[in-house]
Image (cartoon, rainbow, N blue to C red):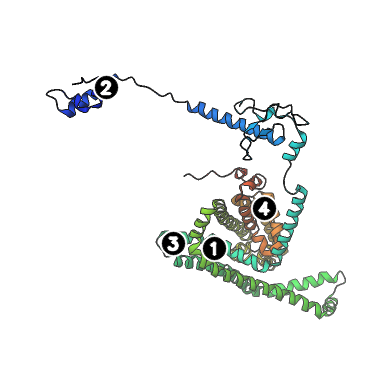
Amino acid sequence: MKPRTHDDSADDPKADRTEGEEPAQGGGRRRRERAERRPRVRTPRENPTEKLKRVRDGVRGQLSMARAVERGDVEWIDENGDGIPDRPATSSESSSDPAPRTQKPVEPQAADSAEPASEPDRPDSESRRRAPVGLPRFTVAVLTIGGSWLAFSLLHELSSVLAPLFFALNMLITAYPIHAVLVRHRCPKVLAALVTGLTVIVMLAGFLGGIIWSVAAMVTQMQKYVPQMNSLYRQLIEQLSRFGLGEDAILERVKSINPQQILSVATSVLSDTTSVVTMVVVIITGMIFMMMDTPQIAERLELAGAVKPGVARSLSAFASGIRKYWLVTTVFGIIVALLDWAVLLALGVPLAGVWALFSFLTNYIPNVGFVLGLVPPALLGLFDKGWVTAVIVVVAYSVLNFAVQSIIQPKFAGDAVGLTPTLSFISLLLWGWVFGALGTLIALPCSLLVKALLIDADPGARWINALISSRPQDARPPDPPDR
C-alpha cells in the first residue's frame, strides 16, 4: 500500500482520524493546527487618500488634454476608426500640418502641470468663451421698468375689485389662528372655518356700528347747542360785514351759484357713496368664498411645500407678517385714542370717551379717517367752550396723529413686516396711487406679498433683502431642512 503523504492526508478527511478519537473532534483540531502553521499572505491595500488623489490627477490631466485639443493646440489620432480619438499625435505624425503646433501635449498623469494656469494666453478664444449670454443689462432694465409700469397700470384699472378682495384676505389671515385653535381642540374644520369667517364679519359690523353710534351721539348732542350756533352765525356775519360782505351780499352770492355745480357735487358724493357700498359688498362676498377654502388651506400649503418649499415658506412668512402688521396698527390706534381722550378730558369737551372710540375706529380709514375723527370733538369744543378750545383740539389732534401715525407707527409696522421705513413710506405712495384710499390701508401688506413671491421665494433674488428688509440677515439663504 502506498504510504500517505502530508498532501494526501490533507485531501482525505479520514486520514485525520486517530485511534480513540471521534472523527469530528480530531479532524477539526488538526485542521486548525495546519491552518495555524500555514503562512498568512496579506494583500496590501491602497490608501483611500492616495487612490482619490490618483483618480483626481488623472481626471485633471484628461480635462487639460481635452482643452488643448479643443483649442487646436494638440492633434489626436483615431487608430480604431470609430471616430473617437485614441492618443495624441507625435511630432512626425503632425509634421504635415502647415502650421505646426509648438505647444507640447500635457500628459494625463501630470496633475501638477495640468492646471488651467499653465494654458497659453489666447485673448480671442478666451473672450469668445467667456462672453455673457443673454440680453444687455440696459435692455433688461428697460423691459423690467416697462413691465412693472404695465402691471401697476393693470392693477390700477382693477382696483375696485382687487383691493377689497385683498383686504378680505387680510382679515381672514389675521383671524386664522382662531381656526387653528378650534381644529386643535377637535372641532370640525368646516365649523372652525365658519366660526372664523363669522368672527371677521362681526368685527366689521362692529366697526361700522361704532361709527354710526358715534355719529348719532354727535347729532343728539348738537341739538343742545342751537342757541350757540345762532350766536356764532351772527358773530360771523358781523365779522364779514367789516370786509364789505354783509348778509345780503352773502345771500346774493348763494343765489348766483349755478345749479349745475350743485348737481355735479351731489353726483360726486353719490358716486363715492356707491363706491363704498360696492366695496363693502365685494369684501363680504369674497370673504364668504375664501371661508369655504379655509378648511383645506393647510393641506394645500403642505402639498405646495413638497414641490416648492421656498414658496410655501415665503407664504407662511407673509401670513405671519400680515398678523403682525394689523396687530401693530391696532395697538397704535389704541394709543392715539387714549391720548386724544386724555386731551379732551383735560379740556372738558363733552362725550370725550365717545370721541376717543370714534378716533380709534376712524384710524383704520385711510387719508380721511383723521379728519373724520377730528371734526366732532372740535365742533363740540367750539360750541361748548369757544374758539380757543376748538383750536387746541385741532392742534393736539394734528400733533398726536402726525407724531404717532406718521413717524413712530411706520417704523414699528415696517419692522413687524420686515421692511425699512423708507420702503414703507414709498409703499404708501405707490399703493395709494394703485388702489386709491383703500390702498394706503393695505400698502404694507401689498409690498409684503410682492416681497414674499418675487424675492423670498427665489434664492437668486434674496440678496435684495439686504437693501429693503429691516432684517438684512434675510439676504442669506435659508438653512436646508434636516433629513
Q: Amino acid at mark 1?
A: Leu
Instruction: Identify which residue, 371 or 288, lies in the foreground.
Output: 288
Dot 4: within a 10 Å radius of its alpha carbon, few (fewer than 14), some, or many (20 or more) residues?
many
Kindly report the distance in space between the C-alpha atoms of the residues bearing marks 1 and 3: 15 Å
For the point 48% across and 61% down, which residue is it? 178
Kindly report the distance in space between the C-alpha atoms of the residues bearing marks 2 and 4: 95 Å
Residue 172 circle label: 1
Q: Could you tell which of marks 3 and 4 lies nearer the N-terminus?
A: 3
Q: Could you tell which of marks 1 and 3 lies nearer the N-terminus?
A: 1
Instruction: Identify which residue, 200 or 360, lies in the foreground.
Output: 200
In the image, is residue 312 above or below residue 90?
below
Kindly report the distance in space between the C-alpha atoms of the residues bearing marks 2 and 3: 86 Å
Residue 298 seen in the figure: yes
Kindly report the distance in space between the C-alpha atoms of the residues bearing marks 3 and 4: 35 Å
Q: Could you tell which of marks 2 and 4 lies nearer the N-terminus?
A: 2
Q: Amino acid at mark 3?
A: Leu
Residue under numbered circle 2? 7
Q: Could you tell which of marks 4 and 1 lies nearer the N-terminus?
A: 1
Q: Could you tell which of marks 2 and 1 lies nearer the N-terminus?
A: 2
Question: In the image, residue 424 lies at what x, y percent?
Answer: 67, 53
Question: In the image, residue 145 lies at what x, y percent?
Answer: 75, 54
Residue under numbered circle 4? 424
